[in-house]
Amino acid sequence: MKLHSLFLRAVSCAFALLTASVLSAADKPLKVGFAQTGAESAWRTANSNSMKNEAAKRGIDFKFADGQGKQENQIRAIRSFIAQRVDAIVLAPIVETGWDPVLREAKRAGIPVVLIDRTIQTADESLYACFIGSDFYEEGRMAADWLAKKVNGTGSIVELQGTPGSAPANERRRAFGDAIAKYPGLKIIDSQSGDFRRAGGKEVMEAFLKKHGKAINIVYAHNDDMALGAIQAIEQAGLKPGQDIIIVSIDAIKEAIQAVIDGKINCTVECNPLFGPKVFDTIARMRAGEKVERKSFNKDELFDSTNASAVIASREY
Ligand code: AHR
């Protein structure tokens, strides 16, 4: 009798342990590591917040790594996510090249990598599961076409480039150049990187104004933060941004939309950073074995004096 009850107790203990381990595997929250580029702009902060808030809403075990503007930091973060055996890695690659070795390590570990915001150049497309972000080429084209109409195809442009080697800097530059090539009167007279930062935009614009003075009619900024920095430099030089110098930019952050309303930025093309929900939906679908789109582009709009006032109150970033 004693032996029998001991046996029963042992069996029920074993069963309880087994059930607990099965349940904990199923109940374990999804573990996702996100290697972000850094915090260079208002756009970036909005993108990080969108990811963090959505992860929290879904109860995801979310590991956030700020690359602080350095590729090597992002590579280190990916290696640490692999060591922590995350279920998926999300990467916003700061530059386009140099990712293959670390992505191969993730692939070997069986961890899918979702690229967001920026694309990479690789000979092996199997190194990432999918891409979610904006079409940077289209943004550059929209900015150029709007500008050409505004200035009747004539003017001297200075370009504030984003981070060298990054997909948005490369694509926005290429698209803009392709589009203005149709207008012989529109010329880029100088082009420098402000690294997508406000201080960078101000510093480069000061140098442009010193070098070219009143020859500058137009600023094409690869993002709003640099455009807002350039505005400070233009005002300090005693000129009127938006009038003496036409300003076209990209991102459509709330502050830039306000600058459009104030007449200081003439047009800003949207690059929407609020796609955290789309990223986690995609990861959930991948885990459920569904086929996901290889490249999914967000829909972006253009804002100028005709529509900026209508959207300012509801602007979320
Ligand atoms: O990759 C998106 C770009 O990066 C945004 O236009 C810019 O503001 C950011 O820093």
Image (tube, rainbow, N blue to C red):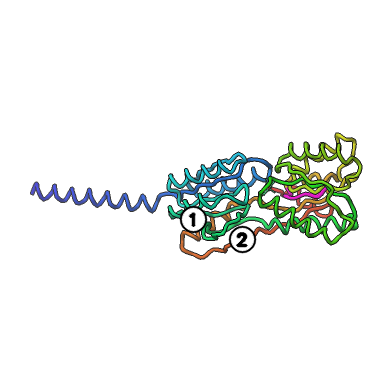
Say if the magenta span includes residue 25.
no
Amino acid type at mark 1: Pro
Q: Position of residue 76 (x, y in %)?
A: 51, 42
User: In the rendered image, which quarter is residue 239 located in?
Assistant: top right
Amino acid type at mark 2: Ser
- In the image, taking residue 309 as reference, residue 109 lies left or right, namely left
Q: Position of residue 18 (x, y in %)?
A: 28, 52
Find residue 296 and name its label.
2
Label 2 secondary element? strand
Label 1 secondary element? loop
Say if the magenta span includes residue 250.
yes
The correct choice, above or below, for 289 with respect to 106 in the image is below
Which residues lie in the magenta part? 247-252
Find residue 112 and name its label.
1
Q: Which SS does the magenta portion mostly show?
A: strand
Residue 260 visible to the viewer: no
